[in-house]
Amino acid sequence: MEAAHLVGTGGAIGAILRYFVGQLLVSDRFPKATFAVNVIGTFVLGLLIFAGADNDMLLLIGVGACGAFTTFSSFSVETVELWDDGARVQAVVYASLTFFTCVLGVGLAAALVFAVGAVW
């Protein structure tokens, strides 16, 4: 398959999954859906990288699906909106929690791959 087809197919899958998570985790106070997709997507991308996924798998799932599933732009806007709405502690907690949880997700992915010995 051509690279653009892999990325496009993965992107369609990731966008649909992102939509469903957004519908499932609706929240007025804390951006749960964005938080969830960023942590899950980071973990999945970490699994791919540490397991040595081949280029086609990285294009399909890493660039395509994870790229469309995760959202740094929504995270950034939601953080600023919380800040502007006067929820400054919540904005700092959200930004910090997202950063540390995503880093933890990558670390857990690496630990899982190394423990299981999974390599593609």
Image (spheres, grey):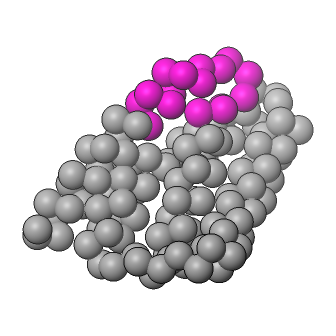
| Quadrant of the image containing the C terminus | bottom left
Name the one closer to the observer, 86 or 60.
Answer: 60
Could you tell whether 22 is left or right of 89 in the image? left
In this view, 25 is above or below 112: above
Q: Position of residue 85 (x, y in %)?
A: 75, 26
Could you tell whether 31 is left or right of 74 in the image? right
Q: Residue at x 76, y 43 (%)?
A: 94
Q: Position of residue 77 (x, y in %)?
A: 58, 41
Res 77 seen here:
no
Range shown magenta: 18-33
Res 7 seen here:
yes
Q: Position of residue 110 (x, y in %)?
A: 65, 74
Name the one closer to the observer, 47 or 85.
Answer: 47
Q: Residue at x 50, y 48 (%)?
A: 71
Could you tell whether 4 is left or right of 32 in the image? left
In this view, 2 is above or below 29: below
Q: Residue at x 11, y 69 (%)?
A: 2
In this view, 107 is above or below 33: below
Could you tell whether 104 is left or right of 81 in the image? right
Residue furthest to the left in view is: 2
Could you say which quadrant of the image residue 88 lies in?
A: top right
Could you say which quadrant of the image residue 20 lies in?
A: top left
Q: Residue at x 66, y 32 (%)?
A: 32
| Quadrant of the image containing the N terminus | bottom left
Q: Position of residue 33 (x, y in %)?
A: 59, 33
* Magenta-drawn stretch contains 17: no
Name the one closer to the observer, 92 or 24.
Answer: 24
